[in-house]
Image (spheres, rainbow, N blue to C red):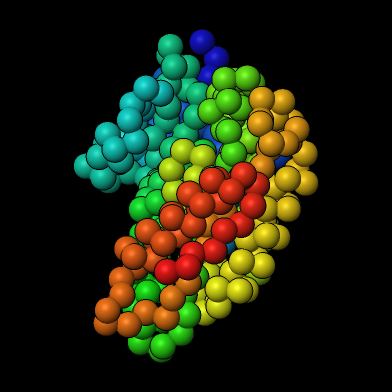
Amino acid sequence: MTSPIPSVVEGTTLKEVAEFMRSHKTPVVLVQNKALDYIGVVTDADFTRKVAANEGSVYTAKVESIMSSPIKTIKGSTVMAEANKVMHQSRISHLAITEKGEFTGLLSVVNFFKYYENVEDYLSDLAINDGLTGIYNRRYFDEVLTTEWKRAKREKLPLSLVMLDIDYFKKYNDTYGHQAGDECLVKIAISIADTLQRPADMVARYGGEEFVVILPNAEQEDAAKFSEKIRANIENLNIEHKASNINRFVTASFGVASVVPNLNSSCEELLQNADKALYNAKHEGRNCVSVSQD
């Protein structure tokens, strides 16, 4: 079988290898011995690093002088952790990937660094971001609320909380399907995030169709005005909701609570007050903003 990764034979000059890689538009070539066994690999990085350090002429120096060897092969189904183990134990910097006897790709130390960097970023995102909407999740919201509560208490500043719930969302799902429901949640999450005005403000998905916004150093009146702005922006998305009892478009109800934390108060009470205000907004007809009186 012919390998999808181009190859050259040992004894090929560096000049010939460079021209071969350029003509084939490939950043990597495998090196074969006279018996056509694969003995090493050359990448474009090898040229930039090793050719400059090679005292011989590129017209006479052979490909063996810059290739990485030996080379080992693994199946494409091999998990990354196992591949990393093979590279570490063999003390090699490249692994050729095979599928049904053909070379289909190449892993290098650089690939692994990038892979694990991406994995760490991904796991970090999973820890703080909601998987559907991309905004912060409830777990991270709890952490931020605790931090902002302590800061507000220490500096004697107001802390406001906004809880909002999409009106008649179950009916929306029943009418348009859960995929449309997910798309609706994403659009609303983006709308709320785009409305945030200060770096310290944050929005999180609290659960289901419920969202929560933290507004540090914001008085209750300002938080209520901000909530009204979010409410209008959501309605102006013009997401059709023919099953709604109050509007032809998707709307949301809001509960606002504010406090200057002290020794006799807690962030749990702030959450409860915002939740009560949200309940009042629904009782008052929905698609409105209700402010806690506690």
- In front here: 192 or 44? 192
Vertical position of residue 106 compared to residue 143: above or below: above
| Quadrant hosting residue 252 | top right
- Using residue 50 as the reference point, say whether residue 71 is left or right of it: left
Question: Residue at 47% across / 34% down in the picture?
Answer: 106
Residue 263 x, y percent position in the rendering: 27, 82
Going 53% across and 19% down the picture, which residue do you hit?
Answer: 3
Which of 78 and 293 lies nearest the eye of the viewer?
Answer: 293
Left or right: 170 in relation to 230: left
Residue 80, visible in the rendered structure: yes
Vertical relation: 122 (above or below) 258: above
- Camera-side residue of 46 and 179: 179
Give the quarter of the figure containing the C terminus. Answer: bottom left
Residue 202 coordinates in the image, percent (x, y)? 53, 63
Q: Is residue 287 left or right of residue 291?
A: right
Seen at 61% across and 57% down, the residue is 289
> Residue lying furthest bottom in this view?
155
Is 254 placed left or right of 94 in the picture?
A: right
Residue occupying the far left of the picture: 89
Instruction: Name the residue located 66 percent from the left edge and 30 percent from the top edge.
Output: 244
Residue 80 in the image: x percent, y percent?
A: 34, 36
Q: How many labels, in total?
A: 0
Residue 99 location, quadrant = top left
> Is residue 117 visible to the viewer in this orientation of the structure?
no
| On screen, residue 190 above or below 144 | above
